[in-house]
Image: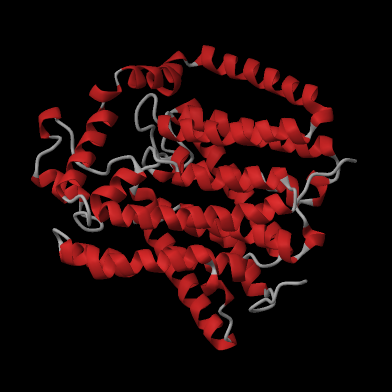
Amino acid sequence: MHPIRLTAPSPALKVFVYLLPALLLFSRAIADITVVLVAFTFLFISYKNQYWPWLKQSWFVAFLVFNAYLILLNLPQSSEPSESLKYVLTFIRWPLFAMALAYWIFDNSDIRRHFIISLSLIMAFVVADTLWQYLFGVDWFGIERFTETRLTGPFRSPIPGTMLLRLWFIVLFIACLMPWFKYTTVRQITSLMTIMSVGFVFTYLTGERMALILYCAGAAVVFITMLFIYRDYQRRLLSMVVIFALSLGMIILISPDMLDRSIMSIGTKLSSFAESDYGLVFKAAWQVWQDNWWFGSGLHTYQSVCQQQQLLASAGMVCSHPHNLYLQLGAETGVVGLILFLIMLCLLYKQVLLPCIKAKNGLQTALCFALLTVSFWPLSGGISVLSNWVAALVWLGVGWALAVSRASVLTPHEHLSHTNR
């Protein structure tokens, strides 16, 4: 059975797909405008063609229930109704953007390959620019390091690791989609291991601890899955890990300060977590939640409530966001909102992973699981999913996962599996 497509891939759509990674990566305003335009265009095309099967997706229905809760119960309880109102009314753009990608833009194998090529080129540019900054102190645009152990790359803020975190797990699909890479098993596993290694080194050198932890967790899921899938190539895989470890050792010897920042400081934080900056921020979020247990303080009000109560003032810290998605959801939307969001998330995982599992495609299952989990794991900053620039990349990942999962059901001949040649 072939998918019913809203429109045939046009030259304009192909151009847009090539531009999409840059539109989402380099400007907060342009990223948001892109998300809104894609969502509204998708609604218009769906209405024009009377094409609404995506509305029946259980996870999207659950999201609509969550959004209705925000409007009807959470908003009236908000400590800052005017601030919450604009975020509640615009929050729906994110899942609509994901649906537009899954059912329209990425609903074609050639388009998905074009996107992978574009994304790979943009990421190669970011990686090269950031590594140049690491080596010479300034990047190609004259942007200096944020600190000695924090890099900015072309973003002017110390966020390159966070910005590329989810994109690495999309680029890994190059081993499944591009004919040259999937032609033989050796090429496939070599490309997967090379991309994961480059991703680790890049994230390590940016000095972003949380991004590194999440990246390693996602990469570990993919690598363990590869050991099971490529049973005849386990020695080759392990030898690649040894080569990578030796190369990483050389990098560590060259820059011991980066080792302390990216690796050793993680142990230090965990050993005294309650007294660390993360522990204090978590406690502040928990306190805000306790004061508004059932319905929360209102979407996008955590920062103002935290400041009003001076929860971090004694520690000399500024209230920003809890660095924990579910603590922020609890504080701002209460127990009811958190439960509704978790139901939506569980249904989303089911929608993405079940078709991959039924198709007996372990590699695609692992890639999709890693892609979703690095965005929705608790230690992902809550603001990155709810209302921030990074949210565009989060829901890009959701849309991509939905699209490739849907393709494995609708077009068996495009099945994204490894070869045994």
Which residue is found at the position 14% from the left and 28% from the top?
315
Q: Residue at x 29, y 18 (%)?
A: 272
Is 43 left, or right, of 265 in this rendering? right
On the image, the x and y values in percent for residue 213 come to 47, 30
Q: Picture quarter containing residue 21?
A: bottom right
Which residue appears at 64% of the width and 54% of the height? 354
Quadrant of the image for the N terminus? bottom right
User: Where does the image place residue 48, in percent across and percent down from the top left?
Assistant: 55, 88
x and y percentages locating residue 381 in the rendered image = 36, 43
Q: Which of these two is toward me, 385 or 244?
A: 385
Residue 92 in view = no
Q: How many marks?
A: 0
The reply to whether residue 151 is visible in this rendering is yes
Q: Quadrant of residue 54?
A: bottom right
Q: Nearer the viewer, residue 209 or 416?
A: 416
Specify whether 170 is left or right of 95: right
In the displayed structure image, the side of residue 117 where residue 75 appears, left or right: left
Colour convention:
secondary structure
Q: Which residue is situated farthest in the top direction here?
A: 253
Question: As drawn, which residue projects farthest toward the right?
Answer: 421
User: In this view of the protein, which residue sits in the foreground, 23 or 139?
Assistant: 23
Q: In the rendered image, which quarter contains the C terminus? A: top right
Give the residue displayed 56% in from the left and 37% down from the top.
Answer: 218
Above or below, comparing residue 70 to residue 156 in the picture = below
* Residue 244 sits above or below residue 128 on the image: above
Relative height, residue 69 to residue 348 (above, below): below
Looking at the picture, how far across and down is residue 383, in whole percent? 33, 49
